Image (cartoon, rainbow, N blue to C red):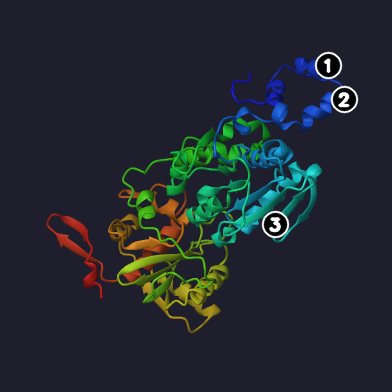
Amino acid sequence: MMNNPNASQAEIIAALPLQQQEDFIESLTEGEVEYLLSSWRDFLARKNQLSPDGDWDIWMMMAGRGFGKTRSGSEWVREQVLNCMETEGEPIRIGLVNETQKDLTQVMVEGDSGILAVCDDIIEKRIKKPVEIYFKNGSIALGYNGTEPEQLRGPQFHRFWFDELAKYRYARETWDQAQFGLRLGKHPRCLITTTPRPIELIKAIHAGNEGRVHVTVGNTRENMSNLAKSFIDKIYNKYSGTRLGRQELDGEILGDVQGALWRLSEIDMYRFRKDFTNADPFHGLPKMERVVVAIDPAASNDENSDEHGIVVAGISHGEAYILDDGSLKGSPSDWGKKSVALYDKWQADSIVVEKNNGGDMCKSTIHTVRSTLPVIMVHASRGKHTRAEPIAALYSQGRVHHVGAFTELEDQMTNMTDKGYVGEKSPDRCDALVWALTALFNNIIRDNTKKGNATKILPIKNFW
């Protein structure tokens, strides 16, 4: 029995007894069958995949993975193009934005549920790079990525579609630039399709602080009939009911973890808003006195291995800046080459590795790539959460600034508690961050008193 109030007509029919399904199909003409199989609004879409009525500026579809967000976005673009003469009286310009150029191309444009698949019959031509899609009625869609917000300075549009906005490194900067350009037509609008994450921008949009918003929520369960059994067995059954599952599958905006050493709201408070008017990676940042690349390598190298944590941080006048997160999966050669590349990009002074975790091997791997690089060994004499406590205290004092957002790193940080790590697998990115900041703030001291082993942070003036 179908018990999903948002079920599509196709799902309702598929849930009927076989004989009733056959009777329904036999009652249709060939033309009716063809229409239903191609009709998104009347047959294929669930109710919460359809654009809402009402006088909204922003439609935020906040749903779990596998919900069908990409198909919903592509179908929304199709409807906007087909109805533009009625709604705007002219062809329209649509901005397509994803976190990276790869996601833009492979998901929004070329994916199985992307614009090319959904809008094939109404497209005149497509240019791959830069992403440009020309429709037969004169409308055009132009693609951008969230790593270069300055691309959006100047162009103007009737509509925008942002995909996975919650994970952009420069979400706020990208969003703000786009809003200046969303100025054409009678009622400029935008669609956001995203798995939620409690960043400042998503919370602001959800609260209605960025314009009149209609929020659609949805979860992975609603689209089970269209998902591979292997996905349900490996992902859904494993994570359903967990904190990660509530965010990634149920589409919830989660609050802070109890006892967390870091809170995303605190990271957001001191986040550095980068100046993108110059290609120099340091442009707009204060002059760095030291820059380090810190590595926390995984113990193994197979499909089930953890990531190799690689984080770049710099310090200026007693305040640290998280500049890059180059963490990856791969061989020692892979992380060695990546670390050296980041060392060059950020003009680093040294590479930091943990002595306990195969420090000599790490040093050898780095020197295999370049024999002259200075390597600093740090010693782990305490547990992960104990090592992280003085670093978290620096964040509370506003001494650490993330240059943009680092989604995976920050997720690990906010799952590190005073009792240990409560996230999935190993917090390699967070460990690398701790090593980097420990090397930069090397005068953090321990105050061993009779009251306990409390962490004490020296005033800024005593660091230098």
Quadrant in the picture for the N terminus: top right
Q: Amino acid type of disc 3? A: Val
- Give the amino acid type for the residue marked by disc 2 in the picture: Glu
Say if 455 sits above or below 4 in the image: below
Between marks 2 and 3, how big is the CA–CA gap? 37 Å
Q: Quadrant of the image for the C terminus?
A: bottom left
State the image quarter where residue 432 is shown. bottom left
User: Which of 224 and 186 lies nearest the eye of the viewer?
Assistant: 186
Dot 2 surroundings within 10 Å: few (below 14), some, or many (20 or more)? few
Residue bearing mark 2: 30
Crowding at label 1, few (<14), some or many (≥20) Cα neighbours within 10 Å?
Answer: few
Q: Mark number for residue 27?
A: 1
The reply to whether the C-beta atoms of the residues labelled 2 and 1 are less than 8 Å apart is: no
Residue drawn where x is 47% and y is 57% of the image: 406
326 horizontally vs 374: left or right: right
| Left or right position of 358 against 391 | right
Which mark is nearer the camera, 3 or 1? 3
* Residue that label 3 marks: 131
Residue 103, quarter of the rendered image: bottom right
Q: Earlier in the sequence, mark 3 or mark 1?
A: 1
Residue 426 location in percent, x, y? Answer: 45, 54
Element under disc 1: loop
Percent of width and height locating residue 395 = 32, 58
Going 64% across and 29% down the picture, which residue do you hit? Answer: 46
SS for tag 2?
helix
The amino acid sitting under disc 1 is: Ser
Asked if 314 appears above or below 114 in the picture, the reply is below
